[in-house]
Amino acid sequence: MLHFTVISIFPHMFDSALGGSILKRAQEKNLIRIDTVDLRDYASDRHRTTDDTPYGGGQGMVMKPEPLVSAIEHARQHAPRARVILLSPRGSVFTQSTVRRVAQEESLVLICGRYEGVDERVSAFVDEEISIGDYTLSGGEPAALVVIDAVARLLPGVLGNENSAAEESFSEGLLEYPQYTRPENYRGMKVPEVLLSGDHQRIKAWRAEQSLQLTRERRPDLLAASPMATEQIRSSDSRAPVYLALLHHPVYDKNGAIVTTAVTNMDIHDIARAGRTYGVRRFFVVTPVKPLQKLALKIINHWEFGYGSDYNPTRKEALALARICDTLDDGIISIEQETRRKPLIVATSARHSEHRTSFVAVKEMLHRETRPFLILFGTGWGLTEATLSQADYVLEPIEGRTEFNHLSVRSAAAIVLDRLLG
Ligand code: 4FV
């Protein structure tokens, strides 16, 4: 049973909120106990004064230390192991992980400030300060209610079925998936077919994907902190491993002749880092020219094993994706060895032609498919028609807002990755 003691000059503000629904039932089931304490009972003067003017001048009033500290000490006498929390905008921002932490306590004393706040010396008698958000309330009471509500619903037996808390937003650090109920068709807006399928595996996967997608769109800041997100992103990517290949031969020169271009430090760097960012499995640097292979290896080893790897470990992670191979086929063979599957070849080209596949279509395939995908990029003036014809799909050219389409292969690679895996 978790015991809440709320210290406030407006203790009755809690009557209605605590008198309804889940919290009322939880009190009746002795899962929680909530005592509201009138701070004025701890005032020492007959006017029951709990605030005074601020030293140093300034607007408003400040809550006096004596009544607050007496109330805190009285509460500690009754609950020696209580955790005393002051609700204030200076506190650590209240999140679901804070909720999980304080829900472990057996007793919480919540102090509700008013006016401009409480005398600074009260902090010496408080265990922690919590803020429910970066805005100013007229009093700590609403914040205390938020804490009581969020904590109580995590306690076993408070919610009808335990699992519902487990599936909520933030329970796994992600935003909750879209919810639907009857009617199936509301003003032409239909419930997603998957939810009517009865296939719980598919429903679970769809909901997880939706949570991830919504969080990516609305709260990308949450992704980094959510172990589930990281796992899901990793697992979702495991459905269709993506490989990149940068071809230095055969490619066209500006006259359309088939040539071999030089490897460049920047291409290897930037495409490796973009690849790492989007969770690509491997990045093949394709050139049959031994001296250029040696140069490429020198660049990669510098960052993966050499001075670079200490100087900047993140580069190490990225460059570790790079592999040098003579030909495209070598890359394809090593993917087949690694995945036991023949990769789907997706070529890229800045040249328009009828046989092009949209980014949306390939993105959709990436979600549906489990076969590996190999995305080809060409240096120079691009991949040859022979290579394009060898591909399963050729992506539509990247179009900006002008007719100018001479992106560097590095930029093209970053844009393609973001459109397909972003
Ligand atoms: C607040 C918050 C908050 C500040 C002055 C009440 C007000 C007065 N408490 N999270 N945000 N408190 O604005 O917890 O004391």
Image (spheres, rainbow, N blue to C red):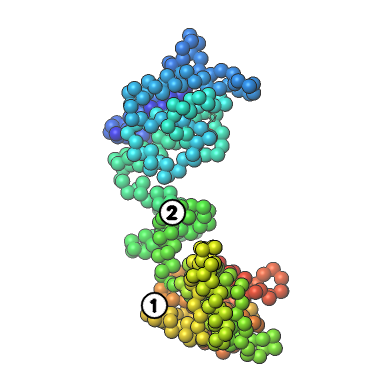
Image height of 279 relative to 163, above or below: below
Q: Residue flagged by tag 1: what amino acid is it?
A: Thr
Q: Are marks 2 and 1 in contact (CB under 8 Å)?
A: no
CB of residue at label 2: within 8 Å of ligand 1? no
Real-space Cα separation, disc 2 to disc 1, in angstroms = 28 Å
Disc 2 on helix, strand or loop?
A: loop
Residue 195 shows in this picture: yes
State left or right for residue 353 relative to residue 108. right
Image height of 206 relative to 123, above or below: below
Q: Residue at x 42, y 41 (%)?
A: 98
State left or right for residue 2 relative to residue 227. left
Label 1: few (<14), some or many (≥20) within 10 Å?
few
First in residue order: circle 2 vs circle 1: 2
Q: Residue flagged by tag 2: what amino acid is it?
A: Ser
Label 2: few (<14), some or many (≥20) within 10 Å?
some
Q: Residue at x 46, y 80 (%)?
A: 344
State left or right for residue 270 relative to residue 321. right
Disc 1 on helix, strand or loop?
A: helix
**Position in image of residue 185 (x %, y %):** 45, 57
Residue 339 - label: 1
Residue ID for mark 2 = 226
CB of residue at label 1: within 8 Å of ligand 1? no
Image height of 222 relative to 300, above or below: above
Residue nearest the viewer, comparing 120 with 49: 120
Q: Where on the picture, by quarter, is residue 148?
A: top left
Residue 361 - label: none
**Position in image of residue 123 (x %, y %):** 48, 28
Q: Report the quarter where the N terminus lies.
A: top left
